[in-house]
Image: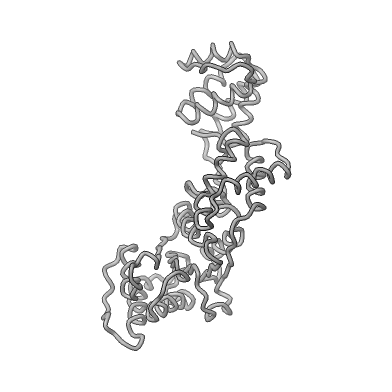
Amino acid sequence: MNLSGPDFQRVVTVVAQLYDLDALRFDLRGIEHSLRALPGGRTMEAVVQDVVDDAERTGWLPDLLTMLAACRYPGVCEVAGELLAKQAGPPDQPDPFLMDLVGQRLCVDRALLRSHFKDLVSASRSRVLVVNGQRPCGKSFTYFFVTHIAAREGTFRPVLIDLALWRRPCTPYHLMASIARQLGLAAPAVDPSAEDGGEAVDLVDWLVGELGRDSSPDCRYVFVIDSVDRVRMLEETESLISFLAGAALREKIPGLRVVLLGYSRLDLSPLDSVLSEVVRPVDEQVVRELFLRLADLAEVDLDRDAAALAAEHVFRLLPADPGQRLGELSNAIRTVEEGLFGRVVM
């Protein structure tokens, strides 16, 4: 059981205003909890914040709220009773396409990606999303976003094909075999020795036979093909990727959507069923806006200048190597977030 940022601050504020330290200590003993040793000079609000935070982290928040709902202070009783009732009811479900936290990874900004992917898996004409950008910019984080949406929505199966995982250039057969295994299908029943482009055509025809029986246009499968711009590809493999995109565009597999990361061929771009985005590295402005959103969630006053200073601090914590900076960005944001708000808000 956890409280939202506004609810957390609401209960902390009302308890700090109406309780004194001795009364809080006495009531906590009644539910077999005690205050930790307190350093001098701490405000009542800081003490209460520690109590509520500990109750959330260690699982006794329901006991704490039940205690507060039955206490001697009507204002506290009212707030705690409302929060207990709210927790008992169905939780509000935020739009998963707009969330900054994807699993345990921060996914900040990427507004166009969010909009495009929401369109891709909805009842629209879109069938292919092409994501480009100069490395390292975070294109590969698209897969975590896709799997996050798949888990939340439960309407489609994500399939990841990362071409960089093969030590040698990936063959068309191995690429399709990876797709088959992830979908729980038998190995592709095609002749891998076919010539003149025949293997790629046969593989797509085989997949159409396996998945194309369902005539519903609703999104059923999302293939994310990563590292297209990082590896040396066989011509046949590149043809297979193009044919997979074509199978989605021509609705040979009506429920298929394809996301291509680092795909620079121009043969897809003029089509209105193809969405495209150029991903740019996260900068200080993006992180500043994130801190302002977190301040709203925590109901903490934070002006734009303070948010800008926090964003600058994040980037000072990052290593100099561009490849490492992206991987450490979430940790740096978390560090500054805890220092700024006294806890992790999201």
Residue 198, image quadrant? bottom left
Residue toward you, 188 or 94:
188
Name the one closer to the observer, 141 or 190: 141
Point out residue 93 in the picture as x, y percentages from the top left corner.
54, 46
Would residue 258 appear left or right of 16 to someone viewing this image? left
Residue at horizontal 57 percent and vertical 70 percent from the top? 276
Quadrant of the rendered image containing residue 344: top right
Q: Nearer the viewer, residue 208 or 9?
A: 9
How many marks on residues? 0
Give x and y (percent) for residue 74.
64, 18
Task: Judge whether 237 appears above or below 92 on screen.
Answer: below
Residue at screen point 52% across, 64% down: 135
Q: Position of residue 62 (x, y in %)?
A: 49, 26
Residue at screen point 50% across, 60% down: 142
> Height in image: 38 above or below 222?
above
Q: Nearer the viewer, residue 112 or 4?
A: 112
Quadrant in the picture for the C terminus: top right
- Residue extending farthest to the front is 320
Q: How is the image coloured?
A: one colour
| Residue ranking furthest to the bottom | 196
* Left or right, residue 315 beside residue 264: right
| Position of 265 relative to 7 (above/below) | below
In which quarter of the view is residue 313 placed?
A: top right
Is 5 left, or right, of 62 in this rendering?
right
